[in-house]
Amino acid sequence: MPSPYTLTGDSSLLLPEFDAPPAEPLGLLDRWLDEAGRRGVSEPLAVTLATADSTGRPSARVLLVKQLDARGLVFTSFRGSRKGHDLADRPYAAMTFHWRETLQQIVLAGPVEVLSDEASDRLFAERPYAARATTAVSRQSRPLEDEEDLRERARRLVESGDPVRRPAEWTGYRLVPDNVEFWYGSPDRLHRRLRYDRTRTTADTWTHRRLQP
């Protein structure tokens, strides 16, 4: 096993937000995402999404954030998948961005809401045609009986060029964070941490504080 004590990435970033935090975290997250793209982070929108089932047993997987809006972070999935079942039972999740190239992490947690059919239709229409075709012939997390048949049905649909409708089980979700932490790693292990918590008095205001490494 490789050494767990190596830390690779750019430790020279100037991040004044740790000393002068903005009032709310989603604008800062948007800025970090833009800067991650400019700094060469290979998959800045990839996150680990953690959910739990009705008994509290957790599960996690990596997926892509589709949108960041004023309320939170949007992702998509099948209702019949494990995360879909988890979110139906416990509509709460945690999400982690990890950017090795820049030693940055962002961790968010909060309730998850199901988007409307209209919003889900728009998200589906934004996908590349081949991705829509694959989604239409697959039922995520169901048992796979014949991989070649699945691939052949996807290939035929792509070649046909026929319109592809959103499967009824495929939907958009939005994580509405009630806490957000920004983390920047340091080779001396004195990592920098900034945590935001949504106030109970109003959904539009936040408190923030620095945390020890």
Image (cartoon, rainbow, N blue to C red):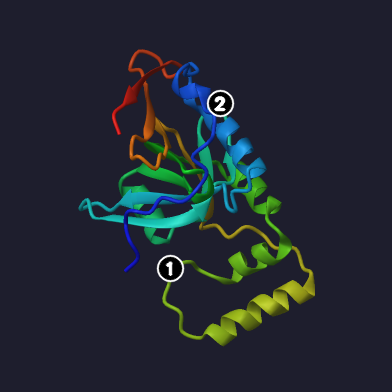
Q: Would you say residue 48 is visible in this rendering?
A: yes
- Mark 1: which secondary structure? loop
User: Residue 207, percent across and down?
Assistant: 37, 17
Q: Tell me the kind of residue under disc 2.
A: Gly
* 107 relative position to 41: left or right: left
Residue 178 occupies which quadrant of the picture? top left
Pick the front one: 177 or 188: 188
Label disc, if present, on residue 141 of the rendered structure: 1
**Residue 35, quarter of the rendered image:** top right
Q: In which quarter of the image is the N terminus?
A: bottom left
Residue type of the residue flagged with mark 1: Ser
Q: What residue sits 49% from the left and 40% below the top?
A: 11
Residue placed furthest toward the top: 201
Which part of the image, by quadrant, shows the C terminus?
top left
Task: Determine crowd level at label 1: few under 14, some 14-19, many 20+ residues with C-alpha closer than 10 A.
Answer: few
- Is residue 120 positioned above or below 158 on the image? above
The Cα atoms of the two marked residues, 2 and 1, are separated by 34 Å
Total numbered badges shown on the rendered structure: 2
Image position, residue 77 (x, y; %) = 50, 55
Disc 2 designates what residue? 27
Residue 54 at x, y percent in the picture: 24, 51
Q: Is residue 178 visible?
A: no
**Local SS, label 2:** helix
- Residue 123: x %, y % from top left: 63, 48
On screen, residue 117 above or below 78:
above
Q: Is residue 95 left or right of residue 135?
A: left
Is 149 in front, or is 185? 185
Q: Are marks 2 and 1 in contact (CB under 8 Å)?
A: no
Which of the two marks, 2 or 1, is nearer to us in this view?
Answer: 2
